[in-house]
Amino acid sequence: MGFGQQQQQLENQTVSRRDENLGDRPNRVFDAEYVPNQVIVKFSSGVKTADIETLQQSLGATVLGTTTNLGIQLWELRNLTTDQAIATFGNDSRIEYIERNYLRSLDATPNDPSFDQLWGLNNTGQTGGKLDADIDAPEAWNIQTGNNVVVGVIDTGVDYRKNWV
């Protein structure tokens, strides 16, 4: 199965429901989409590999991914639902946290009411021009928006390359 098919299958499996298990945690998310039967697990420091394997077996978990710099793993569950796993292992001393695999997306397109007139940034043919003859600004903004960046444009309006003589 190709990546696009996997992504579509993942999107078809997502669910949206109120997150009851996060309780009074300050970062609780309500009505958020998440991937069913998947959890993100971070282990407490000093947890032995044998303990991790025991947890995986009890959850019927398969490791889908690991980030060594953050020390977390993405697990797919076979024996328990996501809610059951969080309720059962949320207070386990071997686990720093266990949470749903939430889906997030960023829409960095400006809310400027005149944005649709800026064909150079995102040309949809809105002024009769050629579709997609633009700098792909929304696509770029979905990759990077910058941080503390100041851009200055100096334009005298004079074509200094033209031979006026």
Image (cartoon, rainbow, N blue to C red):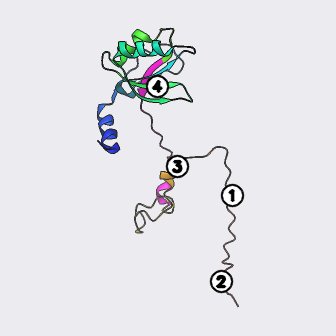
Q: What is the three-letter code of the residue carrying label 1?
A: Gly
> Residue 88 location in percent, x, y?
40, 9
Q: In which quarter of the image is the N terminus?
A: top left
Q: What is the three-letter code of the residue carrying label 3?
A: Trp
The residue at which mark 3 appears reads as 141
Mark number displayed over residue 62:
none
* 3D distance between C-alphas at marks 3 and 1: 18 Å
Q: Which comes sooner in the sequence, label 3 or label 1?
A: 3
Extreme-front residue of the structure? 50
Q: What element carries label 3?
A: helix
Bounds of the magenta segment: 98-118
* 3D distance between C-alphas at marks 1 and 4: 43 Å
Q: Residue at x 46, y 12 (%)?
A: 51
| Cβ–Cβ under 8 Å for marks 3 and 1 | no
Discs 3/1, front: 3
The residue at which mark 2 appears reads as 162
* 3D distance between C-alphas at marks 3 and 2: 35 Å
| Cβ–Cβ under 8 Å for marks 3 and 2 | no
Q: What element carries label 2?
A: loop
The residue at which mark 4 appears reads as 73
* 3D distance between C-alphas at marks 4 and 3: 28 Å
The residue at which mark 1 appears reads as 152
> Residue 105 location in percent, x, y?
45, 38
Q: Quadrant of residue 77?
A: top left
Instruction: Classify mark 2: residues with Cα within 10 Å, few (<14), some (14-19) or many (20+).
Output: few
Q: Which comes sooner in the sequence, label 3 or label 2?
A: 3
